[in-house]
Amino acid sequence: MTEGSEQGAPRRATLKDVAALAGVSRATAARALNSYGYVGEEAAEKVRAAAETLGYHGNRVAQALRQGQLPLVGFVPGDIQNPFFARVAHDIDVELRGERFSLIIASSEEDLTQERALVANLLALNVRGLIVAPASDADHRHLVQAAGEMPLVLIDRDLNLPCDSITVDNQGGACEAVAWLIAQGHRRIAVIHEGPAIVTARQRLAGYHQALAEAGVAPDPGLVAVSPSTVEHAIDATIRLFSGPDRPTALFTVDSQMTKGALLALRSMGLVIPRDVSLVGFDDFDLATFTDPQITVVAQPVGQIGALAVQMLVDRLQGLDTPPRRHVFPTKLILRGSVARIKS
């Protein structure tokens, strides 16, 4: 151990200290301790003896990061505060630990610029693979680059890139939900969605319009509200939709955060589900079965997505060389008590 500092705490030996004691250059000491390049046996023995005398421990973590040897995988979700991504992140972490990998999570917060920076940072750390829920399909050059350097798995949103992907049948699930509302006699069906930047929101909105078209119901732009995927914004969007004189008889929300916001907003307006308004949400969530009535939802198999993403990634790390695999999970409409039938 080297001489203590002014406060008495011992100073950790450095590579420079080892080289000085062994009487060699720092480069020679580094080669001897890290087993690369040529070092004569006599010099190597002096370096090892000096390191033992000084209690030197090299920064193995930094070295492994530079050489891409640490078993790290990066996960870039859209918004880690969203229960969907939180559950997927948990499952990815559990599965990776079983494969002796560690997880780095960096949320894009649905911002493309932030996503590009995060992916660049993870590439610089030499992670072994990436799992990403793309914030947008407007520009995916950074993901193409990542796919060319390491295994990449896209979840929730497929951009048709040269990598594996896992999605659900968003359009089909939304269409089934709105068709169910129509079958119960509803024609003025409102929808809250995230806007065209998010692929899943776009697909679910397409399912909404598909169900209307198939039933011969004319779309009404006044029944469509765009809102960020937060409870607070969904509250505002719901109040806007239901403040007019000819309010909707039903509401379809495209994710669980919006469903929660809609529940709070309708309650604050004194509207009772399903007597005054019927409600169907995309994504199941815990609160959906604790409300009275329980909420009808389009459920996706969130508990299977993280495990499959890790399996796909590990397959590639182990040398699997096949065309990109695209797995699309089906959805399931779970009928509960939040939809009332309108009498003709």
Image (tube, grey):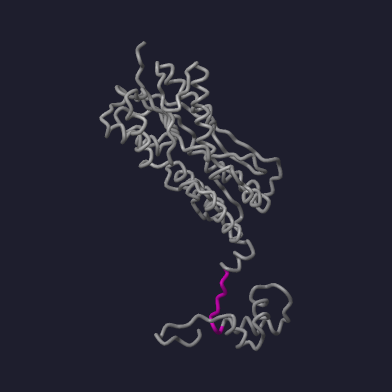
User: Which picture quadrant has residue 44?
Assistant: bottom right
User: Could you tell whether 268 is left or right of 254 in the image?
Assistant: left
Residue 292: x %, y % from top left: 29, 29
User: Which picture quadrant has residue 20?
Assistant: bottom right
Q: Residue at x 62, y 61 (%)?
A: 69
Residue 115: x %, y % from top left: 54, 51
The residues colored magenta run 53-60
Residue 245: x %, y % from top left: 32, 24
Can you name the residue that lies furthest to the top here? 344
User: Could you tell whether 52 is left or right of 43 in the image?
Assistant: left
User: Could you tell whether 72 is left or right of 90 in the image?
Assistant: right
Residue 286: x %, y % from top left: 37, 37
Magenta-colored stretch includes residue 55: yes
* Camera-nearest residue between 178 and 25: 178
User: Which picture quadrant has residue 17?
Assistant: bottom right
* Camera-nearest residue between 174 and 191: 191
Prevailing secondary structure class for the magenta stretch in the rendered image: loop
Q: Residue at x 45, y 27 (%)?
A: 221
Is the residue 110 above or below the residue 17 in the image?
Answer: above
For the image, the number of numbered tags is 0
Magenta-colored stretch includes residue 212: no
* Camera-nearest residue between 111 and 275: 111
- Name the image quarter holding the C terminus: top left
Could you tell me if residue 266 is visible in this image? yes
Could you tell me if residue 101 is visible in this image? no
Is the residue 13 above or below the residue 110 in the image?
Answer: below
Q: Residue at x 50, y 53 (%)?
A: 105
